Image (spheres, helix red, strand yellow):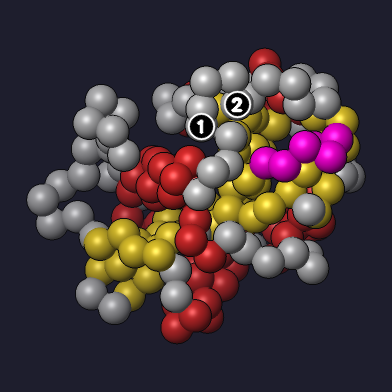
Amino acid sequence: MTASSAAVLPQDAPAIEVEAPRHAAAVEALVDRAFGPGRFAKSSERLREGNRKLDDCSFVALRGDQVIGSVRLWPVTIGGKPVAFLGPLAVDATQRSAGLGQALVETACAAAAKAGWKAVLLVGDAPYFARIGFSAAPAAKVVMPGPADQRRVLLKALVSGGDEGFEGRVAVA
């Protein structure tokens, strides 16, 4: 996170760490609580099925040993052009509104930039993600698999011009 864009977390903020295999069950339980069974019908799930998360770009927020937040990135393509796909982002209901979701997204994006990704794609709430640098404009010609509200398809450049030229169908890389 850069000093200018970093989420402001309290001093007793949870630790943010790379997701390890030991966190997998707790992450799945957190995502289930956050999104319910309806999440499996979403087009974003089609991009995670049969895909493997980017281990170095997926993070958990921990309070002690308890997973209270999670974000994962996945390799996908848009019209054959590689991009990291963010989701799901989940924060325990008791921990929301403290900037933890933003901190997780910023951490994942910084890791993706370090790993050489040029942009991150997600489907989410434009007003929330706009403050982290995501925009619908560069995703205007991006086609998600299955039904998706195009206004919620967002891209963020990780390098100058990294969000330009994306056009076509999103597919598992």
Please give the name of the residue rendered at 34% of the width and 45% of the height, measured from the top-left corner. 103
Q: What is the x, y in percent for residue 51?
A: 74, 64
Q: Residues within 10 Å of mark 2 (few under 14, many from 20)?
A: some
Amino acid type of the residue that numbered disc 2 sits on in the rendered structure: Gly
- Vertical relation: 167 (above or below) 88: above
| Quarter of the image where the N terminus is located | top left
The reply, left or right, for residue 87 in relation to residue 105 is right
Q: What is the x, y in percent for residue 28?
A: 56, 72
- Vertical relation: 47 (above or below) 33: above
In the picture, residue 121 is in which quadrant? Answer: top right
Q: How many marks?
A: 2
The reply, left or right, for residue 75 in relation to residue 128 is right
Please give the name of the residue rendered at 44% of the width and 45% of the height, measured from the top-left corner. 114
Q: Is residue 137 visible?
A: yes
- Vertical relation: 59 (above or below) 22: above
As measured in the structure, the alpha-carbon distance from the residue carrying label 2 to the one carrying label 1 is 6 Å
The circle drawn on residue 162 is 2
Please give the name of the residue rendered at 49% of the width and 56% of the height, measured from the top-left corner. 57
The circle drawn on residue 158 is 1
Q: 158 or 169: which is nearer to us?
A: 158
In the image, is residue 79 part of the stretch drawn in magenta?
yes
In the image, is residue 106 part of the stretch drawn in magenta?
no
Q: Of helix, strand and loop, which one carries label 1?
A: loop
Magenta: main secondary structure equals: strand
Q: 28 or 158: which is nearer to us?
A: 158
Which residues are the magenta region?
Answer: 78-83
The reply, left or right, for residue 171 in relation to residue 123 is right
Q: Are marks 2 and 1 in contact (CB under 8 Å)?
A: yes
Please give the name of the residue rendered at 77% of the width and 43% of the height, measured from the top-left corner. 77
Q: What is the x, y in percent for residue 132?
A: 43, 30
Q: Is residue 92 visible?
A: no
